[in-house]
């Protein structure tokens, strides 16, 4: 275990098993259709690539990068840093997120994407912290509900570190700036 991790919340085997289940469900729900996955950079990249490998569908992949976080704190203002390359007009869209916390990021993304006239748009998140919600957001596919703890690993970072850890872990307070 990494020296700055206090506790492992989700082991790699549990992550893979749950992602395989989500891929099965999504494949069944969109059977016979082409799905446009939108990965929200950077936190979703490991989840997106494992999910994608499990899909038994034709799939497009595109990315967006939005920002509202600095360190552990949300600034509350979401803005687009990188936009889609492709049009999503008439497409079935699935937004792939690492974690839904306040819900502000997903709320912003859904409002933004709906203006582009997709056929449908749904949300798939690996992690959900429901106790932190500031705005209600519809989540169609969810990997795990977790408690109100700042987590890293499997794509999720703290100040750009720890994305490479193969598990979801809780940071030690000593590894957090200002504590
Ligand atoms: P929201 O807008 O508050 O729902 O936050 C969504 C984004 O905040 C996620 O896509 C993450 O990038 C980041 N985030 C929220 N909670 C955590 C966490 O516990 N660890 C790492 N990143 C987080």
Image: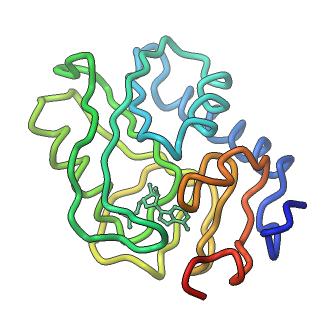
Residue at image coords 50%, 51% = 125
Give above or below for 34 relative to 114: above
- On the image, the x and y values in percent for residue 56 come to 61, 17
- On the image, the x and y values in percent for residue 119 come to 21, 27
Q: Is residue 164 left or right of residue 73?
A: right
- On the image, the x and y values in percent for residue 73 come to 41, 74
Q: Residue furthest left?
A: 115
Q: Is residue 178 left or right of residue 161?
A: left
Q: Quadrant of the N terminus?
A: bottom right
Q: Quadrant of the C terminus?
A: bottom right
- On the image, the x and y values in percent for residue 67 come to 31, 53
Q: Residue furthest bottom?
A: 179
Give above or below for 83 relative to 112: above
Nearer to the camera, 115 or 105: 105
Asked where in the image residue 21 lies, by quadrant, the reply is top right
Residue at image coords 44%, 35% = 39
Nearer to the camera, 11 or 155: 155
Q: Residue furthest right?
A: 1
Q: Residue furthest front?
A: 178
Asked where in the image residue 51 lies, by quadrant, the reply is top right
Give above or below for 6 relative to 119: below
Nearer to the camera, 13 or 173: 173
Residue at image coords 48%, 72% = 72
Badge count: 0
Asked where in the image residue 24 lies, by quadrant, the reply is top right
Residue at image coords 27%, 18% = 85
Give above or below for 152 relative to 65: below
How did the renderer colour the structure?
Answer: rainbow
Q: Is residue 16 left or right of residue 118?
A: right
Q: Is residue 5 left or right of residue 142?
A: right
């Amino acid at each position: 275990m990494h020296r700055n991790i206090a506790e492992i919340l989700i082991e790699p085997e549990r992550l893979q098993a749950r992602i395989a289940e989500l891929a099965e469900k999504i494949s069944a729900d969109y059977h016979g259709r082409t799905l446009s996955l939108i990965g929200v950079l950077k936190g979703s990249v490991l989840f997106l690539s494992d999910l994608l490998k499990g899909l038994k569908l034709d799939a497009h992949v595109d990315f967006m990068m939005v920002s509202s976080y600095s360190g552990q704190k949300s600034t509350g203002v979401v803005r687009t840093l990188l936009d889609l390359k492709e049009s999503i007009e008439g497409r079935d869209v699935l937004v792939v997120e690492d974690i839904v916390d306040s819900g502000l990021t997903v709320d912003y993304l859904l409002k933004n994407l709906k203006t582009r006239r997709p056929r449908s748009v749904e949300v798939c998140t690996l992690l959900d912290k429901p106790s932190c919600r500031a705005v209600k957001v519809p989540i169609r596919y969810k990997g795990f509900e977790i408690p109100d703890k700042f987590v890293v690993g499997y794509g999720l970072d703290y100040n750009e570190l720890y994305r490479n850890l193969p598990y979801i872990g809780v940071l030690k307070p000593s590894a957090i700036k200002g504590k």
